[in-house]
Amino acid sequence: MAVIVAFVSQKGGTGKSTLARALAAIIAHAGLSVRIADLDPLQSTVVEWEKLRKDSKLAPIRVEAFDDPAKALASAEEGELLILDTPAQVNRATLEAAGRADLIVQPSSGSVDDLRPAVLVFNELVAAGVPKDRLVVALCRVSGEREEAIARTYLKAAGYQVLPGSIPEKLAFKEAHNRGQAVSETTQRSLKERVDSLMTALFKKVAVQLEAKAKRAARKEKSA
């Protein structure tokens, strides 16, 4: 039984692929099974990043391209963490796939231009029956503490969870991606501390789901 984490956003450039790669790197370094489903065949951001990662001879992370979220879900393997990196401009198929995820993460900056559509997407998922406790926002590409505080106030008023920490807008993170690294693998201590706070919180949420699925699988096997 796989654990599925979906990264969604109504807009491009908010940080979905950044977060998907960072989470996959953390899970892989922990020795657990992980795979990223790149659902944007036009951009293929994560597929291309995997090639850079191989060229740099970094620890491998499995990435597969899909043109249909349903096919990605059908490919889920026993015991793995399947990360859905969805395209921008959420459509019906993406929402249906997200609705089947164990955790749905939406990145946003502190701009209302990003926050408002983020809330609208989550509102739509809630209206479709997705429990609010599966929905969480991760702050990305923020310029500083003031922007982060504004975003947290806005999202709290909307009734949605926000992970601690944030990913600031830094050239070092772009350079890491250019080398096939994830932002969680950066060696700059000052930047790593901020990313670690966010990714540790996200990892804990994923770990809860992994443990719950493992226990259910064990009970099922015992009763068979």
Image (cartoon, rainbow, N blue to C red):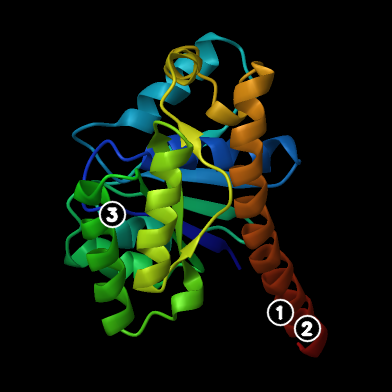
Q: Which residue is mark 2?
A: 219
Label drawn at residue 55: none
Label drawn at residue 115: 3
Task: Say if 98 sits above or below 125 in the image.
Answer: above
Q: Please indicate, yes or no, whether residue 84 appears anywhere in the rendered image.
A: no
Q: In the image, residue 32 lies at what x, y percent?
A: 71, 46
Based on the displayed image, in which of its 4 quarters is residue 104 positioned?
A: bottom left
| Most foreground residue, 57 or 105 | 105
Q: Earlier in the sequence, mark 1 or mark 3?
A: 3
Q: Which residue is mark 1?
A: 216
Query: What residue is rendered at 18% in x and 67% in y?
Result: 92
Query: What residue is rendered at 51% in x and 16% in y?
Result: 176
Q: Amino acid at mark 2?
A: Arg
Q: Amino acid at mark 1?
A: Arg
Q: Earlier in the sequence, mark 2 or mark 3?
A: 3
Q: Please indicate, yes or no, whether residue 220 appears anywhere in the rendered image.
A: yes
Q: Residues within 10 Å of mark 2 (few under 14, many from 20)?
A: few
Q: In the image, residue 200 lies at what x, y percent?
A: 67, 47
Under circle 2, the secondary element is helix
Query: What residue is rendered at 56% in x and 58% in y?
Result: 77
- Calculate the distance from the C-alpha at mark 2 to the C-alpha at mark 3: 41 Å
Closer mark to the observer between disc 1 and disc 3: 3
Q: Amino acid at mark 3?
A: Leu
Based on the displayed image, in which of its 4 quarters is residue 224 positioned?
A: bottom right
| Most foreground residue, 110 or 6 | 110
- Calculate the distance from the C-alpha at mark 1 to the C-alpha at mark 3: 36 Å
Task: Say if 143 sits above or below 128 in the image.
Answer: above
Is mark 1 in CB contact (under 8 Å) with mark 2? yes
Residue lying furthest front in this view?
146
